[in-house]
Amino acid sequence: MTVTRETKDNALILWIDNPPVNALSQDVRAAILAGVTEAQNDASVKGIVIACKGRTFIAGADVKEFGAPPTEPFLPDVTAAIENSKKTVVAAIHGQALGGGLEIALACHYRIAAKGAKLGLPEVTLGLVPGAGGTQRLPRLIESTAAAEMIASGKPIDANKAKANGLVDSVAEDYVAEAIAFATTKSAENRRLSERAFQLDAAKFDALAAATRKQAKGAAAPGAAIDLIRRTAGKSFAEGMKEERALFLHLRASEEAKALRHIFFAERGSNKLPDDISDAKPIEVKTVGIIGAGTMGTGIAMTYLDAGMNVRMLEMAEDAVARGLARIQSSYRDSLAKGRITEAQRDQRLAALTGGTDYAALSDCDLIIEAVFESMDVKKAVFAKLDGVAKPGAILATNTSYLDIDEIAASISRPEAVVGLHYFSPANIMKLLEIVRAKKTSPQALATALSVAKATNKIPVVAGVCPGFIGNRMLRAYVREAGLLLLEGAAPEQVDKALTAFGMAMGPFAVADLSGIDIGYKARKEAAPGSFEPMATIVHDSLVEAGHLGQKSGSGFYTYKDGVKAPNPVALTFIEQVRSETGRTPRAVSDAEIVERTMFALVNEGYWIVEEGIARHIDDIDVAYVNGYGFPRHRGGPMCYARGVGLSKVVKVIEGFGQGAFGKWWRIAPALRNAAAAN
Ligand code: COA
């Protein structure tokens, strides 16, 4: 039974118990409807409370049902029955009231929240708009632009804010008792939101509409939500509901919604233990050691401080320690000034942090992460020292982005303790954590890596050992094609624009300028010959050798004079030189070709990665690309995008690329051919 009934103090409590998150599956909807309907003629019931067992109030519609046609009773019918109830209905909210969960609460006559509860309409993050009155009732309850902002951003608000803006009526420790009191003493009269009207403040709403479209980066749902609210303002509730439902059903079947559902579940698959060690148990991590207090080390340190753990930071010299500590202090000062953390939180985090130069300080750490210079010799020297001081059972992690972790592990006496934890800069902000399972990594070390990912709010993906693991290995193929397009006739700005129009957060040349063109230059000098295409980075190399390192030197592919980004004429001259020296006549390259060349390079490499067992599931590649490489979420990741294009078409286009001057890089992964044939 997913819904049980309890009678207490003349109130009927409908207890929803549908783990893990009390989603509104068909049986739950039916049982709520039956409970409310039957209570109407039950003289012993004075009021009704809707409450949930387990960790949360209703966290939304059941996303698993979205792929199939809706089944009765439909949620709008359930919310209508709740609102029309003669007897007062009260929502008792703890944990999260999200999506359909908040729509149920909005249909209730009163809403009581537990402390710390969160309330939101995250439908746009799934490519939808609320479909059971959320877009119509919320602007009739709270100020209409604030309501529109909640709907268009999908971001939840906490109970205190909800009390302040009128979304909830009371925040109470014993929220169920309070809900019973409301249900049995307060009237439902004048509490039905459908009986109210709403208007917009035009100037405020226009500003929100403009900001929403900018933030959506090509996703359709946020703008559609704004248009719906604008269109229905001043109209009757019935008319608004009709328009809302039509838009909801239309969006539900869209490619964007499918892609966003795909990534929602992919992210909830990539954080699971691999099947072969599904019963492995993590060790408890309270104290974390971090070697290296540069940008990466301090970012990683803050990740753990933010999650309430102790951090011991280690550097080679006292002044480097001091710089690292100062960087963290200054970052928390900024967060405090922006109101993101409280003074107490800042003090607590800084109190949990120590820094020094003596490895002995790491002897009580449960997990130690090395984030030093990317050189095998340097990393091995660090691991030799860790082997000497780390307590038995401690997990030893490396943040390398390219190096062979099996070789690092083999150099110490406890290879089973070694795992890769590849963070992305800025490490305390970026969601992706690539967890690298080396040949000898123990089940416990891997389980611990996955459990700290959860504790520190990261989205993990497990990868095997190969140069660049999943993300950077694919990036190399993408950067290769972007570089070769320059020789064929495209300009850096055109490539960047075509890819940002596709939805990428930044284009590859803007990214190169941001991270420093010299970084890749050094890596290429050390890379095995034949592992990359030298012609693809010939312009990069010329720029570095002429001192154009990117933003840090003031110019790279672009110049950055007085904060204005413009194409760097030096880069354009280098491109022309290479073209003429290699006898190439530039041709017109279309934006569509730019997208196909770079995206299909990612896709083909992705299939190789699956083929070789570097990724354990194709969906993990999408999770990595969306959360670590600025791939547009509403396209579901490169592999999901390729399925949308049609894998047979992808294979055909790649076969064409294989005929080109650099065709040797387009060897098609058998896994891609097989998947295309299976389709
Ligand atoms: N429908 C179906 N299943 C859902 C779900 C939903 N709306 N929300 C969460 N789940 C499932 C997850 O798939 C996961 O299943 P698993 O254990 O088999 O992997 C499980 O519930 C736990 O979810 P998870 O996200 O890992 O837990 P959490 O504690 O980190 O977060 C929530 C809980 C509710 C905040 C989060 O799951 C969430 O935001 N859910 C989506 C809410 C939403 O968008 N609702 C609107 C739908 S229109």
Image (spheres, rainbow, N blue to C red):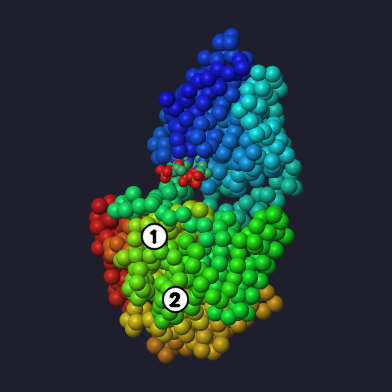
User: Comparing marks 2 and 1, which lies closer to the viewer?
Assistant: 2
* 613 sits left or right of 595 in the view: left
* 180 sits left or right of 411 in the view: right
Ligand 1 within 8 Å, label 1 CB: no
Q: Amino acid at mark 2?
A: Lys
Considering only vertical position in the picture, is 285 above or below 92?
Answer: below
Numbered label attached to residue 308: none
Tell me residue 576's x, y (percent). Answer: 48, 85
Q: Are marks 2 and 1 in contact (CB under 8 Å)?
A: no
Determine whether the residue tagged by mark 2 lies in a helix, strand or loop: helix
Tell me residue 257's x, y (percent). Answer: 47, 46
The quarter of the displayed image where residue 551 is located: bottom right
Residue at the image position 59 percent from the left and 57 percent from the top:
306
The residue closer to the viewer here, 531 or 72, is: 531
The residue closer to the viewer here, 127 or 35, is: 35
Return the residue at label 1: 445
Of labels 2 and 1, earlier in sequence is 2
Considering only vertical position in the picture, is 243 above or below 219?
Answer: above
Q: Amino acid at mark 1?
A: Ala
* 90 sits left or right of 382 in the view: right
* 452 sits left or right of 666 in the view: right
Residue at the image position 58 percent from the left and 10 percent from the top:
44
Considering only vertical position in the picture, is 44 above or below 406?
Answer: above
The quarter of the displayed image where residue 89 is located: top right
The residue closer to the viewer here, 377 or 63, is: 377
Circle 1 packing at 10 Å, graded few (<14), some (14-19), many (20+), is: many
Return the residue at label 2: 385
Circle 2 packing at 10 Å, graded few (<14), some (14-19), many (20+), is: few
In which quadrant of the rendered image does the N terminus lie?
A: top left
Determine whether the residue tagged by mark 1 lies in a helix, strand or loop: helix
Tell me residue 228's x, y (percent). Answer: 60, 40
